[in-house]
Each structure stands twice: as C-alpha cells, then as structure tokens.
Image (cartoon, helix red, strand yellow):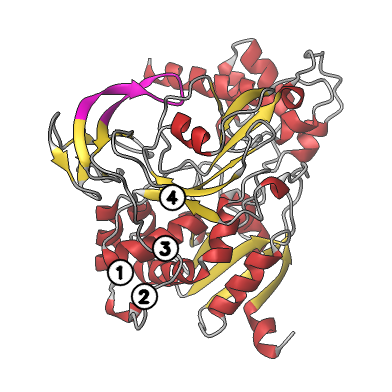
Amino acid sequence: MTAMQSEKLLGKFSFRRGVHPPHRKDLSQSCPVQEIRLRAGQRVVIPMSQHIGAPCQPTVEVKQQVTAGQEVGSCEAFVSAPVHSPVAGTVVEVSPQPAAAGTKVLSAVIEVAEDQTNGRPWKQKKENQDLHAYDSAAIVAAIRRAGLVGQGGAAFPTAVKLMPNEKKPVDTVLINGCECEPYLTSDQRLMIEAAGPMVDGLRLALRASGARRGIIAIEDNKPEAINEVMTAIRDIDELQLAICRTKYPQGGERQLIKAVLDRVVPTGGLPLDVGVVVVNAATASAIYWACVEGRPLTERIVTVTGRGIKQPGNFRLPVGMLLSDLLEVCGGLTADAAKVLLGGPMMGPATGRLDIPILKGTSGITVLSRDEVAREAEKACIRCGRCVDHCPLKLVPTRIAQAVKARSIDIALEYDLLACIECGCCAYVCPSKIPLVQYMKSGKVMAKNLSIK
C-alpha cells in the first residue's frame, strides 16, 4: 500500500451486535447494469407521495401531453419533494392507484408516446466541470427542483438533509455504500461502473452542507467497488474511504456513524445532532446529475434477484415502471416463486400484487422460492436472550413484543418501542421463530393511533 493510499484508507470498522445472514449477492453482483427502455403504449404510474413528508399535488390533467423530465406533482411544504415524468407521453389518469402497502395513493398515470430508445449517460461525469462554481444555495435549490430523496429506502428529501443549519453545523458527509441487505447489489454495481459521478456528488454535498470532510463507507465484501472508489478519490484531498466489516445492519445510519466516527446518535435524534449527514451512494450520483445537468430523479438502478426469478440482474429503469413489466423483462417468475419482496429479505415488505410502480426509494426486488419462505410455527419464548444480544440498539425485543401482544402500548413505549429500526436481527436469531419485527410494526401503528386520539 502506498503512502497516499494509507492516508486515504481508514481501517476496518464495525459496530457491536448485529447478525451475519448469508449474503446471497452472487445471484446478481456480477451482472452489469442493463438499461430498460419502455415501449409505446406502456404505462408508468407516478405516485404523488414517494418520500417522507407532505405529499405532492398533481400539476397535470388528464389528456395533457408531457415531456420526459416534466414536473407532474409539486408541494410547497418544507419536507417534501416534487415528482416528474420519466417519459414523454399522455396523462391518461390522475387518480388513486395501488401502492405497496395495500392502500391507494393519488398518482398520475402516463402512457408512453413512442419507444424510448436512448437513455441519458450516467457512468461518466462531464469533462472540465468546475464544482467550485456551485455555491451551497444553488446546490440545495437544484436538488430540491430535481426531487431527490434518499434512494436507500428511507426516501427522506435530500435538499432538507443537506441544507446548512447554523444551530447544528455539519463537519462530515458520510456516503453509505455498505449495502448490507442480503441479495441486493444495485449500489455495488453503481460504485463499480460509475464511481466518478458518485464521488463528485459527494463533493457537491460537502459544499451544500458546509462540511469539510467526506467519507465513503463500503463493506469489505465488495473489493471491486473499493478499488474503483479508491481510484476515483485518489487526487481529492477532502475525501477518504472507510472499509467496514461485513455485518448486518452495517448500513444503518446509527450503526455506520458509530462504526466509522465513534459518535452516538441519540434516541429520537438525527445524524445532524452529531455533526454528520449520511447520503446513499445512488443519491450522491443523483446529486451530481441534478446540479450539472438539472436532471430530475426519474431513473434509478434496481436489483431484481432471488431464486424465484428466472433472470436476476441489475437494471437502470424509469421510476414509475410497473413491477409486472420489470419482472417480465427478467423472464418472469419461476414455478416455485412464493413471495415478492420490495427490498431485501431482512427489511423488505412483501407485496401481494404486481401492478404497483417502482418508486424513488425502491433499491431492489427479491423473489423468494417456496422452500425459502417455509415458516416454522411460532413457539413460546424460551428466554434465551439472543434477540437482546444481537439487537444493534440494545433493546429488549421480547419485552416489547409481549407488551404489544397484550396491547399495553404504554409499557412497550417504556421499553423504547419507537427506537426500533425494524432491522429484523431479533427475528432472524430467534429459536422460537417469534415474528418480533411484526410485533414492533404493529406496536408502532397502535402508538400512532393513540397519539392521534
């Protein structure tokens, strides 16, 4: 290792607790990103709410012609993000459409006017681009106009996250390239194939937030990505690379900040409280394109994987593409496909329908086979304490679950129910096969209903 590399490379980091589920990334990690172009007559569904915060209101009407990249929904609320059409076509509906949670969300349905043949470049950054020409206000404004949200799953509006805060100054922007969820490889492929735009997106995030240091964190099971990122940052003084040990949920914000920076985000707090902003790898790339080209977030990379899909791979596709159309591109489901997850197997919710759209925060689709989802009957808790030993937040999942089952939400809250990140570690290690995460989710719904009353 050269002296330069030793300065750029920060040791091997991890956090206490967590689990080590099988990676299962071999199904798609060697598959280069394929670009999907829609055909004339296909439809995209653009929900007005694809982010944490206030939903958008439609800015288009039925029968209106729209162009690719045109805004179709906006909102003036501080915590929100506009939505755009990924294609040129005709608005055929503005109505509630099926969503992943089993509900319906107000959406614009757009019929593609003609075959989409040429996608925008995304692998190579533009030459001779002076990033110092962009000031903080301009960067935040460009991100806001582009409708950028966290692409790792949380979908928090990026402009809000990067906006300078005089009361809580930021010194470090941390790029989350860990992708610790089993099966998923979309961020891994982006870092291998397009490290340049991601790195420059990080540099723009530094300028936006006022931070002086940027760190890209990658788990050590992604050597190709590590090499590409190291090459991309070698001449950039303010950037470093942190190698993290492979463990789940290493990519959780709290766990990553503790592992790399040894800072503890308080319960109920945000990374901002400890001077850090965490940005997903794909989001960093989107920041670059939003600033240098004014490109809205209308495309993203999605991993489609699992033993229940015929042709796993990584795909760059239009946001709003129907899940059924995407699965068709992948050859369809296998005969023993049993469950479709929107995400990975640890945190991804199952969906019972395929006529739902891919969203800005959809990083992967995992299709599990029948033998993978065979569930053993729930047994009585044996008080082994394994869920406590592995919980990355040091909670007591069994106590919380028992309180929820008894509908004693006040007791569940005393045991920090709301601090749970629903990572699934407790359920994964439980020998009694108690669906602890489901109890956590149910308890949070009950708590919310009580607060509304």
Mark 3 or mark 1, which is nearer to you?
A: 3
- Which residue position holds label 2? 126
SS under mark 4:
strand
Mark 2 to mark 3 CA distance (whole Å): 10 Å
Q: Earlier in the sequence, mark 2 or mark 1?
A: 2
- Which amino acid type corresponds to the residue marked 2 in the rendered image? Lys
Q: Which label belongs to residue 300?
A: 4
Q: Is residue 94 above or below residue 226?
A: above
Estimate the x, y position of residue 223 in percent, counting from the top left. 70, 66
Q: Nearer the viewer, residue 94 or 412?
A: 94
Residue placed at 53% from the left, 63% from the top? 174
Quadrant where the image shows the N terminus? bottom right
Mark 4 to mark 3 CA distance (whole Å): 10 Å
Estimate the x, y position of residue 298 in percent, counting from the top left. 34, 48
- Which residue position holds label 1? 292
Q: Nearer the viewer, residue 355 or 273?
A: 355
Q: Nearer the viewer, residue 149 or 321?
A: 321
Q: Earlier in the sequence, mark 2 or mark 4?
A: 2
The span shown in magenta is 92-108
Mark 3 to mark 1 CA distance (whole Å): 12 Å
Q: Earlier in the sequence, mark 1 or mark 4?
A: 1
Estimate the x, y position of residue 243 in percent, counting from the top left. 69, 66
Mark 4 surroundings within 10 Å by alpha-carbon count, few (fewer than 14), some (14 through 19), many (20 or more): many
Q: Which label belongs to residue 448?
A: none
> Which image quadrant is residue 217 in?
bottom right
Mark 2 or mark 1, which is nearer to you?
A: 2
Q: Is residue 221 magenta?
A: no
Mark 2 to mark 1 CA distance (whole Å): 8 Å
